[in-house]
Image (tube, rainbow, N blue to C red):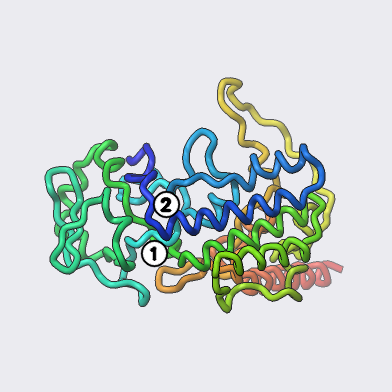
């Protein structure tokens, strides 16, 4: 399976660079609102750092805001998925071509390289980030070469990791704005920054860069909502549902491996899509993306907040009926 970085991970177009510069400016501004020097450094290290690459980089890589708002998930499948890529990357895969994309004419092989035929031109994996519009390579286009792809090695897949799932696609505009609202949520909850002040400061940055806000960007009177977990409605710096949770029992972890136990804590911060991602919709928007508790995120599975609440209500009612029957 693909194990390395996304192909052409360090190749950026002019619009990619412009977007990352805006996000860097947002991070610097949020950091400057943090009065404590040590806390400011902590924010930049863990959240605010921006790396000029498609996949958030290696080593001193981009922070959580870049990984969550701007990049797709890391993937190491036996498939041509990018192992992280910019969400506005112009080549997607889906069962059927979504409304916002044009369809690839054909997918052929040049030895051990995929070739996407688009308007008569051959596009290789290392170049597809330069496509001028969004294109989709749907399921039916892969069928003719599937028997050859089954024989590919891990290195072959790594050398062709150049597409993103359509369900994770977003526009550059939405992605940058999502970076902003997630940043406000972080500094407002964990670094003692007035979220309204952060919101207004970011508006000035957008004006400086002639960035026109989308209709999905939250209004000023909605800023308080950014501070809450979208499911349990508790602050992000409080435990899920404001309930005191028992400590998790320690389990064996090889001492030579980096522990990720903290990421599995019920209250750990995770990316939320309040409406589930779909291949034919763009649901990674500043209106639908939030930070929330891990417990709440796991509880939602692949459902919306409203669907999850309805389910929980039904469960509670079922237990109440059983309790009354036992009295």
Q: Neighbour class for label 2 at 10 Å: few (<14), some, many (≥20)?
A: many
Which of these two is toward me, 312 or 5? Answer: 5
Mark closer to the chain start, 1 or 2? 2
Identify whether 155 is placed above or below 182.
above
Q: Which residue is identified by label 2?
A: 85
Q: Residue furthest right?
A: 327
Q: Position of residue 71 (x, y in %)?
A: 48, 53
Distance between the alpha carbons at the discs numbered 1 and 2:
12 Å
Which of these two is toward me, 93 or 134? Answer: 134
Q: Residue furthest top?
A: 256
* In this picture, residue 10 sits left or right of residue 181: left
Identify whether 58 is placed above or below 102.
above
Q: Quadrant of residue 167?
A: bottom left
* In this picture, residue 195 sits left or right of residue 206: right
Q: Position of residue 196 (x, y in %)?
A: 77, 66
Q: Position of residue 150 (x, y in %)?
A: 21, 46
- Disc marking residue 123: none
Q: Which residue is identified by label 1?
A: 166
Q: Is residue 88 visible?
A: yes
Name the residue located 76 percent from the left edge and 41 percent from the top edge. Answer: 39
Q: Quadrant of residue 91?
A: bottom left
Q: Neighbour class for label 1 at 10 Å: few (<14), some, many (≥20)?
A: many
Of badges 1 and 2, nearer the viewer stands: 2
Which element carries disc 1, helix, strand or loop?
A: helix
Which element carries disc 2, helix, strand or loop?
A: loop
Name the residue located 66 percent from the left edge and 73 percent from the top edge. Answer: 218
Quadrant including the C terminus? bottom right
Q: How many marks?
A: 2
Which of these two is toward me, 260 or 83? Answer: 83
Name the residue located 17 percent from the left edge and 43 percent from the top edge. Answer: 112
Q: Position of residue 49 (x, y in %)?
A: 59, 44
């Amino acid at each position: 399976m693909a194990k390395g970085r996304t192909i052409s991970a360090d190749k950026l177009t002019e619009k990619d660079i412009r977007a990352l510069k805006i996000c860097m400016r947002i991070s610097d501004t949020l950091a400057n609102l943090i009065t404590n020097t040590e806390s400011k450094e902590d924010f930049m290290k863990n959240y605010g750092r921006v790396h000029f690459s498609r996949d958030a980089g290696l080593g001193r890589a981009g922070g959580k805001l870049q990984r969550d708002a701007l990049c797709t998930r890391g993937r190491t499948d036996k498939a041509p998925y990018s192992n992280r890529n910019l969400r506005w990357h112009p080549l997607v895969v889906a069962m059927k071509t979504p409304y916002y994309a044009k369809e690839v004419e054909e997918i052929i092989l040049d030895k051990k390289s995929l070739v996407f035929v688009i308007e008569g031109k051959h596009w290789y994996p290392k170049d597809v980030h330069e496509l001028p519009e969004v294109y989709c390579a749907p399921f039916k286009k892969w069928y003719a070469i599937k028997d050859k792809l089954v024989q590919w090695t891990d290195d072959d897949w790594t050398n062709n990791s150049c597409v993103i799932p359509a369900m994770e696609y977003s526009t550059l505009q939405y992605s940058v704005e999502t970076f902003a609202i997630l940043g406000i949520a972080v500094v407002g909850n964990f670094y003692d920054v007035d979220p309204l002040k952060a919101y207004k400061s970011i508006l000035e940055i957008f004006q400086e860069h002639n960035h026109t806000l989308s209709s999905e960007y939250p209004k000023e009177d909605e800023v308080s909502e950014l501070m809450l977990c979208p499911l349990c409605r508790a602050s992000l710096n409080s435990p899920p549902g404001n309930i005191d949770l028992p400590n998790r029992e320690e389990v064996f972890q090889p001492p030579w491996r980096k522990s990720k136990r903290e990421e599995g804590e019920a209250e750990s911060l995770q990316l939320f899509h309040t409406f589930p991602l779909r291949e034919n919709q763009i649901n990674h928007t500043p209106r639908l993306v939030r930070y929330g508790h891990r417990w709440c995120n796991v509880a939602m599975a692949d459902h919306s907040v409203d669907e999850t609440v309805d389910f929980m209500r039904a469960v509670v009612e079922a237990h109440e009926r059983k309790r009354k029957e036992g009295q």
